[in-house]
Image (cartoon, grey):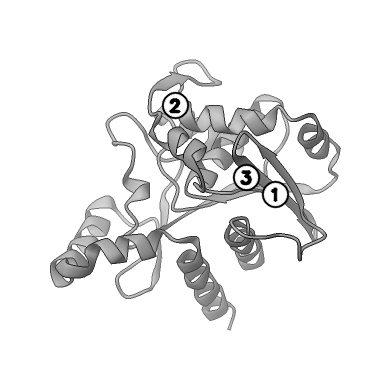
Amino acid sequence: MNGIILNAAHLSKISYGDLSGFPDIKTWEVGGNKLIARTVGDFRYYCFRGTANFSNFKADITTQRVKGLWKHSKVHKGFQDATQKIFFNKELREDILNTDKKICLTGHSLGGACATVLAAKLIGELIPVDHLVIFGCPRVGNARYGNMIYKHVKSIYRFVNLCDPVPMLPTRNRFKHVDYPHYFSKSGKLYIGPSYPWMYWDRLKIACGRLGTIKVEAFRDHSMEFYYRQIKKSTTTKGS
């Protein structure tokens, strides 16, 4: 499993850059949104890039709740619209339908949100999703929406860095996460499923200790580059 998570983190990181040096990666770009795909071993990875332009920013802030796939489910309109722009691409749909590999969906920030919405859409079309691996992902839908994804995806890994503010958005009274966090603490240790009060206390400790640098910490902790370093260090430690 460590290899799957590391592969997902690497794809999420490189999705922001020039991919000309990766001939085995397929790319789709529609309406300012970008998705890349790569096969590694038994898995076909589909990775959404995070926010990189004004169109992506508009998706982030379009926070109306609209009807989701299931009865009583609601989903963030901006994230759903961004996902659908690419999902309706004929070539991408054929790629997904024709793969004989297990499917892993991944992405960072907005990319993680789009990967979550894509998981719901594939579930609705009875296409199995083995893994959903997301980094610094905002809340995507209401409790019903998240619970149905949790029920049908084989495994979900939602990573949160200490001072990253994005997973705390949008507000908890309107949106919920799809699963418990895999949380990198103040000490850099990875905690799986810590309680929210404990996480807030851990964040408060660093906020009190570094009031002058908290904005810098937040920017750093949300970057996919930093997530990748944390994941790589964690998987290396666990595997040694």
Side of 42 relative to 172 (left or right): right
Q: Hey, what amino acid is under mark 1?
A: Ile
At x 62%, y 55%, the residue is 15
Residue 140 seen in render: no
Query: Residue tagged by mark 2?
Result: 144
Residue 132 image offset from top left, x and y in percent: 59, 47
Q: Which mark is residue 154?
A: 3
Amino acid under disc 2: Arg
Q: Quadrant of residue 64?
A: top left
Vertically, is 125 above or below 221?
A: above
Q: Height in image: 213 above or below 44?
A: below
| Secondary structure type for disc 1 | strand
Q: Rounded to the nearest whole Å, what is the CA distance between mark 2 and mark 1?
A: 29 Å
| Residue topped by disc 1 | 36
Q: Reply above or below: 100 against 208.
A: above
Q: Quadrant of the C terminus?
A: bottom right
**Where's residue 145, x and y in %?**
47, 28
Instruction: Kindly report which numbered mark, 1 or 3, lies closer to the viewer in this rendering.
Output: 1
